[in-house]
Image: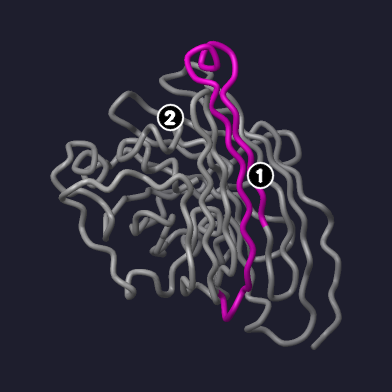
Amino acid sequence: MFQSLQTGVRPSIRAMGLSVGALALLALALPGAAQAQGFQARYSVKLIGLSLGYATLSGSVEPGAYQIDATAKLTGVAALVSSSKGAGAASGLLVQGRVAPNAYATTSANATMTRTVRIAMAQGTVKASEIAPPFEELPGRVPMTEAHKQKIIDPLSALIMPVAEGGAVIGPASCPKTLPVYDGWARFNINLTYVATRQVKVKGYEGPVAVCSARYVAVAGHRPDRPATKFMENNKEMEVWLAPLGESRITLPLRISVATMVGTTVIEATEFETTPAVKAASR
């Protein structure tokens, strides 16, 4: 999802934002019974109302751990212009109400090149990363330090959002948070703020969603003088709708809307299904 918020920053890499998704669980912070939950969602991807393709999101959340997979592909008229497609996976731990990723990998391909990104982490601290082939080093980038690679989340794990105890899963407690994202090349924050609660109906889910406004804040690895960077940092037309994952205190993105320099991209679920929760043994 939050790679899609950077379509105006590196559109050739982001492929119009074809990554999707959000989850959360306080499993390690809470004693007693916990829940295991699976999910599968399919999303349409549109630019200024025109269909670009689709994306899928699937995975599971268990007591103290998660795994998530995503795919995306251009179809229809968009496929005539570019045969871009991609896939990714991430996994990690859920520690005291926060996501602590351990592994992230994506592969994106078009007619001329395939690029793979791999990041190995220890509970959110980057230990090693590889981009093959590497991006071209250009002057003017804000330097990336080791401090920028600590307590981060990768773009797919950023789709996993804990909702703290003390409030309804869908409501004001759903949104207020800062997501510190690192994608192997750039470090940025996504700041979420609660706007409203709406009722929706899609295949697999009917009920409330939390509407969050989103703001992009570049931290490192970007070129601050680029018009696209300035556009995204000043962009107030970004919104995420979050739906609950079964009975857990977890939400997933049902809809993402991002204004880019070439129009508004909308990633919206056409199917949103979860498996029944299964009680896990008490610890």
Residue that extends furthest to the front in the rendered view of this protein: 133
Q: Residue at x 71, y 48 (%)?
A: 58
State the image coordinates of residue 42 (x, y, percent, origin top left).
Answer: 67, 35
State the image coordinates of residue 236 (x, y, percent, origin top left).
Answer: 28, 42
Q: Give the range drawn in magenta.
A: 68-97
Q: Can residue 206 be seen?
A: yes
Does label 1 or label 2 sit earlier along the sequence?
Answer: 1
Query: On the image, which quarter does residue 161 sit in?
Result: bottom right
- Tag 2, which secondary structure? strand
By secondary structure, the bulk of the magenta-drawn segment is best described as: strand
- Binning the other alpha carbons within 10 Å of mark 2 as few (below 14), some (14 to 19) or many (20 upward) gives many
| Residue closest to the eye, 127 or 173 | 127
Query: Could you tell whether 70 is left or right of 215 in the image?
Result: right
| Residue closest to the eye, 84 or 49 | 84
* Amino acid type shown at disc 2: Thr
Query: On the image, which quarter does residue 178 sit in?
Result: bottom left
* Amino acid type shown at disc 1: Leu
Q: Can residue 167 be seen?
A: no
Image position of 20 with respect to 61: above or below: above
Q: Which residue is drawn at 36% across and 42% down?
A: 6
- Tag 1, which secondary structure? strand
Q: Which residue is drawn at 74% across and 50% down?
A: 39
Image position of 203 with respect to 98: above or below: above
Residue pointed to by mark 2: 265
> On the rendered image, what quadrant is the C terminus found in?
bottom right
State the image coordinates of residue 145 (x, y, percent, origin top left).
Answer: 29, 70
Residue pointed to by mark 1: 57
State the image coordinates of residue 22 (x, y, percent, origin top left).
Answer: 57, 54
Say which mark, if any, is on residue 119: none
Image position of 203 with respect to 52: above or below: below
- Binning the other alpha carbons within 10 Å of mark 1 as few (below 14), some (14 to 19) or many (20 upward) gives many
Residue at mark 1 to residue at mark 2: CA–CA distance: 18 Å
